[in-house]
Structures are given as C-alpha cells and as structure tokens.
Image: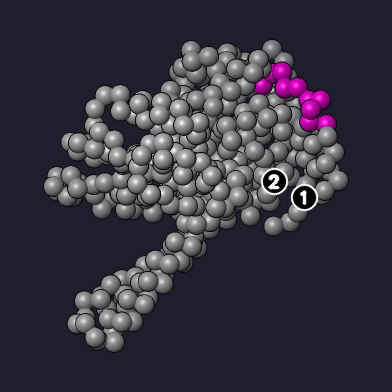
Amino acid sequence: MPSRPAGRVRAVDEQMRHTMLRTAVVVGAGLIGTSIALSLSAKGVTVYLSDKEPMAALTAAALGAGRAEEPPGPVDLAVLAVPPADIAATLADAQSRGLARAYTDVASVKAQALDAIEAAGCDTRTYLGGHPMAGGERSGPLAARADLFEGRVWALVPTPTTSAETWRTVRSLLDMCGATPLVMDPHGHDRAVALVSHTPHLVASLMAARLQHATDAEVGLSGQGVRDVTRVAGGDPKLWLEILSANAGTVADILAELAGDLDDAIGALRALTAPDGDPVRTTGATTLTGLLSRGCAGHGRLPQKRGAPQGTYATVSVLIGDQPGELARLFTDVGAAGVNIEDIFIDHAPGQITGLVELLVTTDAADRLRNSLRVPSTVMAH
C-alpha cells in the first residue's frame, strides 16, 4: 500500500487543533448516519438531516440527531451515509448544489466508488473518502448511538487531489466522534475489509443457514460458540447485497482460498474415519491439526483492545448464578478490587442455573482480581 506524504500529513495534524466543525449535513439517516449526527450534535455542531425516506430523517431528528431540513447555506461538511453504488451520484448532486465546503462518505467499499466519482466529474479536491469500522446487527436510525465510534478505527481514503482544508475538516469529524484515523489506498482498503468484514459476514450467514431447518432439540443445544460464529448473520440482507456487490471480486478471491481449506478439512475428516493405525488416518489428523493451529495463530493476531500491544490482557472466568442482581454484584466486587474491565463475554444458555462470565483485564491485574473474587486460576493470556 502506498505511503502518504509525511510532510503533508504532519502539516495536517499540526493544524487540526485549530479546526472547529460548526455545521454539517448528513445525507442518509440510517444507523451510521444517525450515529454520526448524534455524536456531532452532542458536541454542539448544528446538523441537518436528509434521507430519501423522509420518515427516517424525521425519526433521527426526534432522537436529537439534528434538524430534518435543508441547511440555509453551505455547511462545513457533508457526510454521505449512502450505499457504495450511490456515492458518486450523491456527491455530484451535492456539489452541484453547493451543499458543503468539504465532503466525505462512510461507504465500506472504496475503489469502485472513487472510479465512479472521477467518471462523474466530481471535484475531488473537496472530497475525502471515509469508512468507520463500526456498526451492528440492527439497522435504521432507532439503532443509532452517539458513542458508536468511540475508540474505533475510521479508514480515510483520500484522492490524489484532496485539499489540506478538506483533510482538516474530516479529521475534525473523527476527533468529535472519538475515532482513530487510519489512512489507506482504495484497493488496500477494499482487500482489508473483504478479509476482516465482508467475507466473515458471508461465512457467518452460510453457517447460520445450516440452522434454518434444524430441529428444536438441535437448536436447544446451542451455546455461546455458535452464537459468536453467527452473530453478524442477522444483518439486513438488502444492505449486505449492496456491500458485497461493490466488493464482489475481492470477496470471491478470499472465499476461494477458504474453499481450499474447507476441501482439505473435509478430506481430513473423511480420513479420520479410517481404523486406528491406518496411515490415512494419521495423515488426516496431521492435516486437521495444521488447519486448527493456523486458526489459533490467526486468532492470536486480533487486537484485544484498539492500540494495545499483544500479550497485555488476560481473561478471568467467573461462574455466576441465574438470579437478578448477580451481574451487578460481580461488577461491584470488581470495582472494589480496583480493577478495570476492558471487555466482557457472557456464556449463558436459557434455562441453565449458572452462566460463565469472562472478564478481560490487564495482565498485571488478573491475579489480584482472581484472588479478590476467589476464583480458580482459569486465566488465559492474550
């Protein structure tokens, strides 16, 4: 991926503290657009809202995200929260109306959108592509949150002519939303999101589809593992069709690589049905162990917390009862121990009398917390 000019970036960063975003318009009052509007409004920015479905903009306005009306004049920034295929046309229309002095978007695919923007003759000096790495299974303005982007990476994909003023304005947006900028080129961005977002979503959907006609008894055995694997499969199919269509080739390439591993796994599992001592069974076991080991290695590369080095966190597992107030009491005890919870995972099947709570804490606090809670040494370092 090509590096950004160091001098230019330093100049932009130096001027950022002198930049103030005062007015903005958000085009598209869905989950992401409304969350941005809520965040900006909470910081005192005057936000105007529009959507092809007027009721969506009115709903966002009722939530305190801004005003469902046209701005009286050019605003500082227009945020285009529309599908990737609509970015170019929406930008061209907004620029022709003089809607804002700077423009960005939140589309999850960039190369195709940039090609379309250039083909449409848009002014690329006032445009800086963006993609906040945040979202949820629910869509629409009612699912929006002002803190959705806190601590999240927000990819920035500039054009070759993006102006310094546009840089400053968009960076001000990220600062107000609490996001961390990551500058990328369009093709590098699309490959990355295909790997960490688009393909996982499709794989989760394919796995969840196995459950559609499962028996009640089979589904009744579901634990946290299958919930984790299929969690994102509840996303809006129409929205995901638009996303996958815009990045179809790259996602297909990654799925082809995955298909090769699946073929190896199938062959290895068939081989494990051979009798003990059969060389075929031994080969299958070796292949499957290798695939599982590669999975462990890949999982180990996932950050436990944004910006934190590997190996700085540990998991403390605690069994709690299925009664009202148990979680509250656990959190009170953790607070009394002077330990901050970095993340939390709960494994609890309906009808069970206990649940397993996994608390992610700093490594140096793990022993103190375990001793304070009087739980066994079931701590896994990350």
x and y percent of residue 56 in the render?
A: 47, 21
Which residues are drawn in magenta? 15-24
Number of marks in picture: 2
x and y percent of residue 50 in the render?
A: 56, 21
Q: In the rendered structure, are the residues bearing label 1 and label 2 in contact, judged by CB atoms less than 8 Å apart?
A: yes
Q: What residue is at 19 percent from the left and 82 percent from the top?
A: 275
x and y percent of residue 194 in the render?
A: 52, 53
- Would you say residue 54 is visible in this rendering? no
Q: Does 49 sit above or below residue 178?
A: above
Q: Residue 316 versus residue 68: which sits nearer the camera?
A: 316
Instruction: Say whether residue 222 is left or right of residue 153.
Output: left
Q: Residue 174 versus residue 225: which sits nearer the camera?
A: 225
Q: How is the image coloured?
A: one colour
**C-alpha distance separating marks 1 and 2:** 8 Å
Q: Does 251 sit above or below residue 134?
A: below
Q: Quadrant of residue 287?
A: bottom left
Q: What residue is at 37 percent from the left and 50 percent from the top?
A: 378
Badge 1 marks a residue whose secondary structure is: loop
Instruction: Say whether residue 257 is left or right of residue 121.
Output: left
Q: Does 173 sit above or below residue 362?
A: above
Amino acid identity at mark 1: Arg
Whether residue 18 is in magenta: the answer is yes
Q: What residue is at 50 percent from the left and 37 percent from the top?
A: 342
Instruction: Say whether residue 3 is left or right of residue 49.
Output: right
Amino acid identity at mark 2: Val
- Would you say residue 204 is visible in this rendering? yes
Q: Residue 241 versus residue 376: which sits nearer the camera?
A: 376
Residue 183 tag number: 2
Within 10 angstroms of label 2, few (less than 14), some, or many (20 or more) residues? some
Q: What residue is at 48 percent from the left and 26 percent from the top?
A: 144
Instruction: Please give the residue where the numbered disc 1 appears in the rendered image.
Output: 4
